[in-house]
Image (tube, rainbow, N blue to C red):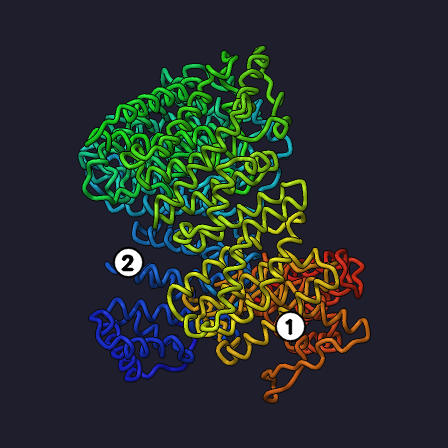
Amino acid sequence: MQGFPGGLPDLAHLQATMNAIEHACSLIQMHMNPAEAESVIASLHSSHMPYQTCRFIIETSKVPNARFQAAGAIGDAAIREWGILIDENKRSLIIFCLQYVMEHASAPDAYVQSKVSAVAARLLKRGWLEFPEAEKAAILFEVKQSILGNHGSGPQFVGINFVESLVSEFSPSTSSDLGLPREFHEQCQSFLEMNYLKEFYCWAQAALLSVSNKILEHPTSVPEEKVCSAALRLMFQILNWDFKHTANEPDNSHSRINTLTSGIRHDAVMLKKFDHSLVKPGPTWNDVLISSGHTSWLLNFYATLREKCSYDTLWIDSPIAVSARQLIVQLCSLAGAVFPSDNGETQIKHIALILSAIIQWIDPPDVISASIQSGQSESEFIDGCHALLSMASLTSAMLFDNLLTSVRPYGTIHVLSSLTSEVVKILTVNQDEEETWSADALDILLETWSVTLGQMDGDKTILPHDRVFAASSLFNTIVESHLKAAADSALDENDDTEYFHASVSKRDERLASYALIARAAADMTVPFLVRLFSERFSLLSQRISGNESTRTLEELYWLLLITGHVLTDSGEGETALVPEALQAGFLNVVEAVHHPVVALSWSIIQFSRQCLDTEMRSMYFSPRLMEAVIWFLARWVATYLLPLDTRKEQISTTYHDDGSQHESQFSRKILLTFAVEHNQVDFVLDSVVRISAATLTLYPGENELQALTCQKLLAALVRHKQISVRLLLLDSWRDLARAFANERALFSVNARIQRSLAETLVCAASFIKDSEASAQYLRDLLGPIVACLVDNSSRNDLKAVAQQADAIYMVSCLLERLRGAARATQPRTQKALFEMGHSMMNPLLTLLEAYKNQSAVVYLILKFVVDFVDGQVVYLGAKETTILINFCLRLLQIYSCNNIGKISLSLSTSLRSEAQVEKYKDLRALLQLLTNICSKDLVDFSSVGDDENTTDISEDIDVFEKCLSAVNALASYHFKQRSAGKEGLNAQTVESQGSNGKLQESITSHFLRLLMQLLLFEDFRMELAGSAADALLPLLLCEQDLYQRLVQELLERQPIPALKSRLASAFHSLTSSNQLSSSLNRPNRQRFRKNLHEFLVEVSGFMRIK
């Protein structure tokens, strides 16, 4: 071929190379000498100008893998040597690849043709911005002719496959590495989208039309089906494109109003489990996708083909069927300006048209599920569920329900309810089977319910009564199916039914979705739960035993879980509120005694109290059931036990247009006040504390149960002043505190759980009004613990007994308790806690020396000091600060003497391994301590977060963020000392590797070099830009001369004038924009954060490449 790169070929050399590559491929295939074989293949990929050799192998070799490797070598070499190839060479490589795949379109080894085609696409993209438009148009014209079928079905398939590879290359998310700036990829993406993407779609449509009649008319399978599948797959891929140039998109600022008037949503719905984005190709695509009747034709084509192949049970999973359904589901997500501005009318017709076709895939549910269980493929059913989810995410609940009424006597929600009921029944019967189709379908259907009902926000008028009844019937089916499964699982000998385990996140996700369905019909579903729970509770009250009691307990376990989700939200990270749907319901209830939520709540609390009865506990309350009890109480207390005055803002917030707001207020007020009226708070609190004490003392070794008790239930009690004040007056609380301080029983609890318990008990003291009373409470609570630690440190035989297991365990428990107390520091308790810490300073140093060979104890001492300093440092005066800093310096000195040489920062890359992270826990703690100490001196801009060190932030962001914070604290301290005329850290030097060997430089110089290297050349994460800015600013102010030299060196190494100018401008803006000054006050730090963010955005496109 004229213009093909490389010298004149030596036939003997070509033959020898081909033989070597073929032999290497055969070795790999037989798993013999893989290292040697890979070395031979790698030499071909890395060799200079291998094009003639690769061409010879591709055209001559009988070994498909050899041809595959040769094609890859052409692509790798061309990208690597692109700068030395002339334009004719580049075109020749692309044309050779295309001609080869066209000429060998019918070859049996399709993966080789796909590889060669992908190489052509990669090279065409590499030269896209260089080649004249006429040359690109000529190449694509030949491809178009093939796709239109002018050269036969073989080249037609190959042409479609090439365009598919081309679209994949031009999409940044799937493009190959070309060694070019991000801007290159973005320019190619933009050019293809604006000039060719729609044209490619039309070519695929034409190819589909050219073969469709033959496929439909022929009674059996024909070769054209391969072309049809490829065309459908290409169309799907194009609609999966991340469209950027969608002009004339509607203004979404009034999307809520638009949704109310048309029922069409204009905002993308964030789904919990599934990736979902709206397909918005823009108005220029209207003629291809909408007005041409394309969707209708596709639906009719699939329906006809489906009917034709109904005899073939395997057809549903054939490439043509799968590709067609993928495209249909993708068309469900069309949105935006591709539809005309007619208040959503055309889009509604479009969605309804698709629904009327795909309803056959999913309805009637019982018939379809029976066929699936008999061996029919589930893929069509799953695709139908996905289509429903896409439609629900684009429409209001009312519109979604009405979409089906034109072709069915019932609405879409009725179908959704029937589908979910059927799937739940199947799933609960087959619960032990892994990854069943019913589990996948249920996830999709529950997501659809969440999208649909999530738009209701407690508005009971949004759905008619029959739709609400459908939700109620579905929830009843869900509960009954799961209760049966729970009862049946009670008799299973294998205790591996993870679905019913109390802490499984997947189960919680499903229960939360079930709860949303229940709340949509709360007037019917909550009374249903009341009846079910009361029936099971009454059975236990009759002291039943044997299999009957086991089944009942499993049912109660599941009822506790689902009821907890219905009555409460998780509240993680938020203030727990009574669900709005429950507040807006129950319009006919005017007295608390008749309110279903109240009745259900008291029934469960009374049931929970039965565990305090010795006989009932031994008969029924297993650790697993207690986990469910504690979990429920923790959520219920956080939601319903707050006094009314903290909830005033919730009253009178929801109104209805049907005159029912007055009745709604009765129900709303009942739910917000029933737990605090008639002295019920003290009864509930006393019950909760006594139950908690029982789990901590009567269930030894049950770490999960005890962790739930301390970290969820008891922690919820001390979050609010009104509850904490009442807690402190209870005998049960005082008994718990006394047992914690003086009795050995709670030492059997896991040490970390003891830390949580200590934190909770100390938190309660912050709500005692009288400071002396608060201090006395803490002295009573912590005094014995401190005394025990001091006594241990002063023993004459400390060195002898320190290494004994029981002594190590006791000291560890004491330190964990003190850590919990330190972490609960509040203004009211700070002074008493400081006095406690002060009394332990010398004993802690003694223990640090005694346990220097016990890394776990050393780490706990360091962590206690870190937490103690962190809690105290902002409150201390000069005298107390001096005491604290002197103590920390002595501690660091002792630690350094005992551990020098054991930790190396040069090994920080080993933090990629979680196991290796454990070796650096001491270092992490020390960096935290250094930052906390420094932040006292720099209180005007205290550092954010904790401190650590690593160079691979992609593996451990937390570690790196801590390191940045430590650098920030040290550099800021140095700058402040320098500004005051003091030496600062100048005396401290670091040995670094420079261009002329090792050099000595200051700490701030060293960190400035490292940080600039990271920002400009390493895998830096933008979420760390704020922390990086805080560390970089004081370094720049301390080392301005070095910074200017580094910038100048960087600019001199930039060979491209345009990029050099951009880089210089970016560096200038970094230190001069936004009125930046030579200060470390908060406003200046905020300005520098903004400057650094803009700098990184500007340079990331050409400093880091893909």
Q: Which residue has dot 1 on it?
A: 1056
Quarter in which the N terminus is drawn: bottom left
Q: Amino acid at mark 2?
A: Ala
Q: Amino acid at mark 1?
A: Ile
| Foreground residue among 369 and 489 | 489
Crowding around mark 1 (Cα neighbors within 10 Å: few <14, some 14 to 19, many 20+) is few
Q: Is residue 1013 visible?
A: yes
Which badge, 1 or 2, is on the more N-terminal residue?
2
Q: Is residue 309 visible?
A: no
Residue 308 spot, x, y in % from top left = 23, 32
- Tag on residue 299? none
State left or right for residue 749 relative to residue 615. right
Residue 532 spot, x, y in % from top left = 33, 22
Residue 551 spot, x, y in % from top left = 24, 31
Question: Which of pointers 1 and 2 indicates the residue nearer the eye?
Answer: 1
Looking at the rendered structure, the secondary structure element under dot 2 is helix
Q: Residue at image x 62%, y 67%? A: 930
State left or right for residue 40 relative to residue 1050. left
1064 up-or-down from 170: above or below: below
711 up-or-down from 63: above or below: above
956 up-or-down from 290: above or below: below
- Tag on residue 110? 2
| Foreground residue among 155 and 1019 | 1019
